[in-house]
Image (cartoon, grey):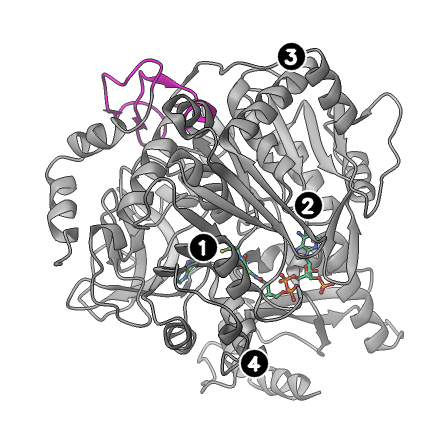
Amino acid sequence: MPSRYAEVYAEWRADPQAFWAKAAADIDWISPPKRIFDDKAGVYGRWFPDATCNTCFNALDRHVVAGRGAQTAILYDSPVTGAKRRISYAELLDEVATLGAVLRSFEVGKGDRVVIYMPMVPQALAAMLACARIGAVHSVVFGGFAAPELAARIDDARPKLILAASCGVEPGRIVAYKPLLDAAIGLAAHKPSACLVLQRPQAEAKLIAGRDHDWQAAFDAAKAADRRAGCVEVAATDPLYILYTSGTTGKPKGVVRDNGGHMVALKWSMQNIYGVAPGETFWTASDIGWVVGHSYIVYAPLLHGCTSVLYEGKPIGTPDAGAFWRVIDEHKVVSFFTAPTAFRAVRKEDPDGALLKKYSTASLRTLFLAGERADPETLAWAGRMLKIPVVDHWWQTETGWPIVANPVGLGLLPIKPGSPTVPMPGYEVEVVDDAAKPVKPGAMGSIVVKLPLPPGALPTLFQNDQRMVESYLSEFPGYYKTADAGYKDEDGYLFVMGRTDDIINVAGHRLSTGGIEEALAAHRDVAECAVIGVKDEIKGEAPVGFIVLKAGVDRQPDVIEREAVALVRERIGPVAAFKRAITVPRLPKTRSGKILRGTMKKIADGENWATPATIDDPAALDEIAQALKR
Ligand code: COA
Ligand code: AMP
């Protein structure tokens, strides 16, 4: 069957508002949109400005009303704890409505923020949906962040309530969340009025009287009293959630997602990009702390009436590199989405797919990869193993859904390894030079998206329109700056090659080298430092920090290096995967004092490098090369 992509993309280009009006008809609105787009509202315009709706209603109630109540909504599969649980749409609705009533009892209402600091347990999903139900704005913080990162998010979001679990379970290690939460609240200037803590049997937390409340007790009390929260009517443009992502400094950016546009875009994507039908089982192996988890573990599968797998485990080690195949087989997954790093990890452990032979993956139609560049080797290996199309697609926390993809539902386009394929409707993608002029096919440039961004993409940063404009809209007027660089080929396929800013991608996680440098610079013996992302066989990139010690420091460099590594873990968290600090006598700089990070990266990656003409002292680069050999 020929792909309908070209026709559908042309339809969107001819009349974007008509296109999204049609897509909006798939959503149950409280008051349907009369206007589709208001170009005068917000920073660059707002979608569905006069409509009202409730996201939780569309994710749950709607399906129960339509007879899908007995279908499994969430399939919780937790190899790290041994738990498995099927939760039907009717049961999830009941749990969410009850939890919504609990949130109300803490006086959380429309527009109030709720921080969720929880691992991959069903209650975390229920918490997100309960916020959506009562019009509160959730902000999920990934469990691998340390207390200062959590504190920064608390201070920006200023939550009324924090929902947390007592612990997360990592292979071979229980991560006690509560001490991190207590430390974060201690550090933050803003104090939430209460915390609701889910006690997990692996490590129960000590509750602080007057502030902390036991989740289960509060839930049981609401249930016994038959208290349930109804769906609150919100504007389509009201925020559904804030998700913090790395900026170029240590201060994270609060990406805002609205209710209406988000539902329209995600619902459209399930059928047309992912090629999945309601009732089918969709699995995204990510974490609800990331955008991929928000969109494709929680909201999109539920909005579409699918069964979503919630997997609390890893690609390897829980218990082995056959974990993905086991879950696909056991739950008859039709569509699987993860990051290339996960496949690199599986491939390293089981290169010939011996464990794959123990299972049937016959239900699986497509593998989707995103979160970092999918290297052609990994792509080819996954295709050889699974014998299904492997689709790379490119997106960002900011967009919330794919910018560039191979739209399986519209008919698969030829796959070109190394390219996430073509722009989706809603996105006019250009590769431009520094003067914002489109470059020729094959030429590298900055990847930008013509404004307005489509429904679902961020309207702004939380209470910070100015940072939104400065970060994304001012450098290339009329465009959204993705901060990715790449090129388009003659067929219009996009190749995304890397970031133009100081963001690095470690195991599919987005990290700011600037943020890590801030942590290193806090060490009392460090005079200056530079962090780069060095090629890593499994994680894509791994951060490496070069530190210059203050004059007169006579402590052993290896002791200071170990302290520096510990400091990054303490300040940013294990997610930074920061394992290597290297002491150097000085950093290579240009004559104007700019650190030559690009050349340092080339040296570390073993690529050809040339001494930049502007360098202050070329010997400083040799010192880096020498230090890396240690
Ligand atoms: N809570 C607490 N700690 C966490 C955590 C969480 N939710 N998630 C990860 N960590 C810790 C890990 O235990 C590890 O700690 P360690 O330094 O003590 O070993 C550290 O953070 C780094 O984690 P990670 O980068 O995930 O590395 P890993 O070695 O544990 O696993 C992979 C490597 C490739 C298996 C893993 O990165 C993976 O599955 N990645 C998928 C990427 C993904 O989902 N990306 C989202 C976008 S699609
Ligand atoms: P995040 O906001 O955490 O989802 O990270 C987004 C960034 O990850 C993008 O700006 C890219 O740099 C990178 N990225 C995500 N998906 C891809 C992909 N398919 N190919 C190349 N880079 C990707």
Q: Which mark is residue 149?
A: 2
Label 3 crowd (10 A; few <14 / some 14-19 / many >=20): some
Q: Nearer the viewer, mark 4 or mark 2?
A: 2
Q: Is residue 225 visible?
A: yes
Where residue 569 sits, quadrant-wise, is: bottom right
Which secondary structure lies at badge 1? loop
Q: Amino acid at mark 3?
A: Arg
Residue type marked 1: Lys
The verdict on residue 50 being magenta is yes
Work out whether 507 lies above or below 13. below
Sequence-first disc among 4 and 1: 1
Q: Residue flagged by tag 2: what amino acid is it?
A: Glu
| In the image, residue 6 above or below residue 558 | above
Secondary element under disc 3, as helix, strand or loop, is loop
Apparent side of residue 447 relative to residue 502 in the rendered image (left or right): left
Magenta-tinted stretch: 29-58
Asked whether residue 593 is drawn in magenta, I would say no
- Residues under labels 1 and 2: Cα distance? 38 Å
Q: Mark 4 vs mark 2: which is more N-terminal? A: 2
**Tag 1 residue:** 332
Examine the image and state in which quarter residue 39 appears.
top left
